[in-house]
Image (spheres, grey):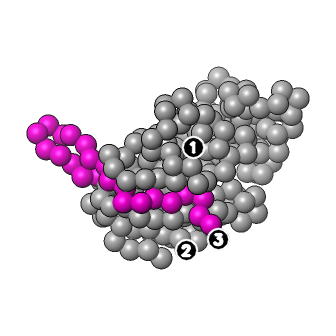
Amino acid sequence: MKPIIRTENVNRQFQSGREIVHALKNINITIEPGKLTILRGRSGSGKTTLMNSLGALDRPNSGKILFDDLEITQLSDSKRDKLRREKIGFVFQSVALISLMTAYENVEFSLRLANYNINERRKRAEECLKFVGLHKRMNHRPHELSGGEQQRVAIARAIAHRPMVVFADEPTAELDTHMGLQVVKLFQDLAHEEGITVVMTTHDPNMMELADRVYTLEDGVIVDEQ
């Protein structure tokens, strides 16, 4: 199966005072479509830097990243913005829902930003909330929802515009193990039932068994692949 994302010798360095921090060192990975891939590692291992590079939020200093056969590392900022807007969804540790909006309004607002067909926004927003199990709570605001429910709204928002890939950075960090497993199972369903490729970062070993592939990072290096 042709990978949806492929990297070639990706390196990323940061200046920290007088020191150069090598956050990523010669990263070569492939992300298969319709799979749940986990980037695993402790804090400072480079997993979030790698995810941000794959998702066109950051640029490596050297190497190539191919997204659906498009080499994205040299794209202009406007073309990278367009790529993220049309083909990528993001879920972060901090769900960043708009507090004055209901669950439905948060999802529908994301469709407006993506210039989704105005006549189909309501149907699509409701579809996504139903998929994550929150159709009956779509008129509730974030403060009326549990942490796990808020994260599921964030997932509905991320998938609403039908992206090719969803990137999730430590989406279970603020949840207990039971709720965290429910969220990761939802990502698994997204990949296997909806065909949306999911890449998530975590340091929680409880989540590994649900992944199709796991890359383990230490000090910016891939040290294991399962």
Q: Are marks 1 and 2 in contact (CB under 8 Å)?
A: no
Closer to us: 169 or 207: 169
- For label 2, the SS is helix
Residue 56: percent from the left, percent from the top?
Answer: 49, 42
Name the kind of residue labelled 3 in the image: Met
Q: CA distance from mark 1 to mark 3?
A: 24 Å
Numbered badge on residue 188: none
Q: Residues within 10 Å of mark 1 (few under 14, many from 20)?
A: many
Q: Which residues are magenta?
A: 1-23
Numbered badge on residue 90: 1
Asked whether 178 falls inside the magenta stretch, the response is: no
> Residue tagged by mark 2?
209
Q: Quadrant of residue 34?
A: bottom right
- For label 1, the SS is strand
Q: Earlier in the sequence, mark 1 or mark 3?
A: 3
Please indicate whether residue 28 sits to the left or right of residue 161 in the image: left
Residue extending farthest to the left is 18
> Residue tagged by mark 3?
1
